[in-house]
Image: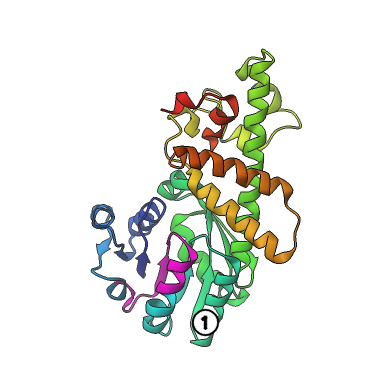
Amino acid sequence: MSRIAFIGLGAMGAGMAANQAKVGHDVRAFDLSAAALEKAGAAGCRVASSSLEAIKDAEVVITMLPAGAQVREVWLSEVIPNAAPTALLIDCSTIEVATARSLGEAATAADLAAADAPVSGGIMGAEAGTLAFMVGCEEAIFPRVEQALAPMARVVIHAGGAGAGQAAKICNNMLLGISMAGVCEAFALAEKLGLDAQRFFDIASKSSGQCWSLTTYCPWPGPVPSAPSNHAYEGGFLTRLMLKDLKLSQQAAANSGAATPLGAHAAALYALFDGLGYGGKDFSALLQLVRGRLSELN
């Protein structure tokens, strides 16, 4: 059994912390939300009154926070100064690559082991313990990181040094956002051409158009029963979170001089969808914007 501090119990963090508790770890959880703390307590976590209380004597400190500014504040003012000398620090938030690298350097300067380990798999994956983790850390500490993340993971992959996990995450999610937009457009065109949606799915899923956005997360209700499209586009990976990741990808592209025209177009589409008030819907609900059927989301 390990003593784990878990800071950040939002839509993703709640399920992740609960899975650590399920395997018998002593999880001390903290969040600014009283409701989130109550939920964590019901899931078997010990509720901490502050992040400092959670961090004290923890063997592993995991943060899952909304954005880079919060991660920087918590790590620099609370985690790094107060973590036990032998503690392993892991940030699972999705933040800027530069921020992740700077925090890794700060931890190293304090003689602490640290990793950035953003996730893929959405709320369902967080609750089921089937997330994919992309890890940026020194190769020597990766086995410790892998072991710490195992109760929450389907797979844990070492992407490289500090910041590499974040780089892999934003590249992956830019690809995901682009592919989902393409699948939505294909279904919308098939509908206009009089092609049955199920028949189109049966063909495309076995042809060169096959991709994860189609076969596992189909945006059209029906073909994939487990997809959010069959549950009123609730849960899953929220549109506002996809937009956040696409913005990060475009910021990184601008800073590095990379050309990502399709990423920019995808970011614009999700920004429009979010601006219309659908940021709380799963990102695959973009289908209804492309179809001109937003009324079906209300």
Q: Judge by depth and name the residue closer to the eye, 189 or 234.
A: 189
Q: Residue furthest top?
A: 194
Q: Residue at x 25, y 63 (%)?
A: 46
Q: Position of residue 229 (x, y in %)?
A: 49, 30
Reply yes or no: does residue 79 show up in magenta: no
Q: Residue at x 66, y 40 (%)?
A: 179
Above or below, comparing residue 49 to residue 110 in the picture: above
Residue bearing the label numbered 1: 106
Q: Position of residue 34 (x, y in %)?
A: 23, 57
Above or below, comparing residue 270 to residue 110 in the picture: above
**Disc 1 secondary structure class:** helix
- Residue 98, picture quadrant: bottom right
Q: Quadrant of the N terminus?
A: bottom left
Q: Judge by depth and name the residue closer to the eye, 84 or 297.
A: 297
Q: Judge by depth and name the residue closer to the eye, 147 or 158.
A: 158
**Which colour assignment does the render follow?**
rainbow
Q: Residue at x 48, y 34 (%)?
A: 228
Q: Position of residue 211 (x, y in %)?
A: 67, 37
Q: Position of residue 10 (x, y in %)?
A: 37, 54
Reply yes or no: does residue 58 show up in magenta: yes
Q: Is residue 118 visible?
A: yes
Q: Residue at x 25, y 67 (%)?
A: 48
Q: Which stretch is magenta?
A: 54-74
- Residue 51, picture quadrant: bottom left
Q: Quadrant of the C terminus?
A: top left
Q: Is residue 1 visible?
A: no
The amino acid type, in three-letter code, at marker 1 is Ala
Q: Residues within 10 Å of mark 1 (few under 14, many from 20)?
A: some
14 relative position to 260: left or right? left
